[in-house]
Image (tube, rainbow, N blue to C red):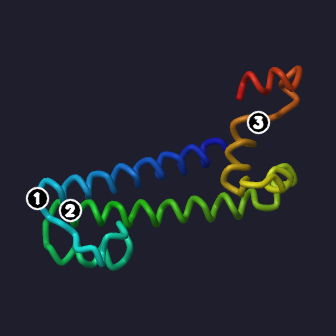
Amino acid sequence: MRDLTRHRESLVRKKGDLKREIIGSLDQHGIKVPAEFKTNFSNKFNEHVRKLDVFIINEKLDLLVTTIEKLKNVEAVIEERYGKDDEVELMMTMPGIGIVTASVLKGEIGDIGRFQSFGNLATYA
């Protein structure tokens, strides 16, 4: 579980990095995206940027699309493997805690019995 949730986090970081790189490349090329496409990385935005036919930007968009697909795959596996886990379901009863956050918490904490007290768990966290 820990490896899977850490892999997801790595993909989320890569996705953000790619978006920042694409925006930076657009700026470097002096490309201003029209207001109608301003919602970064919507389908309309991506189609507009691809039509500009800038090789490096298209390559980065390809990587971004692939990264998003991989991220969805990982999230589906997390849901499949841990969506019915009793401890994960219990954590998900807290407001703001979904399947991913609950899986991260369980994966990182591991066996709660290894902590001598709640204070030790809090210190670890």
Q: Position of residue 62 (x, y in %)?
A: 30, 66
- Measured in 3D between alpha carbons, the distance from the residue under mark 3 to the one under mark 2, in whole angstroms, is 41 Å
Q: Earlier in the sequence, mark 3 or mark 1?
A: 1
Name the residue carrying label 1: 29
Q: Earlier in the sequence, mark 3 or mark 2?
A: 2
Point 40% across, 52% down: residue: 16
Residue 91 located left or right of residue 101: right
Q: Dots 2 and 1: beta carbons under 8 Å?
A: yes
Residue 119: assigned label: none
Image quadrant in which the C terminus is located: top right
- Measured in 3D between alpha carbons, the distance from the residue under mark 2 to the one under mark 1, in whole angstroms, is 10 Å
Name the residue carrying label 2: 57
Point 86% across, 26% down: residue: 118
Q: Position of residue 84 (x, y in %)?
A: 82, 61
Name the residue carrying label 3: 110
Depicted 110 relative to depicted 96: above or below: above
Q: Earlier in the sequence, mark 2 or mark 1?
A: 1
Q: Position of residue 101 (x, y in %)?
A: 68, 50
Residue 12 located left or right of residue 75: left
The type of residue carrying mark 1 is: His
Depicted 49 relative to depicted 123: above or below: below
Between marks 2 and 1 in the image, the one whose residue lies nearer the viewer:
1
The type of residue carrying mark 3 is: Gly
Residue 26 located left or right of residue 66: left
Between marks 3 and 1 in the image, the one whose residue lies nearer the viewer:
1
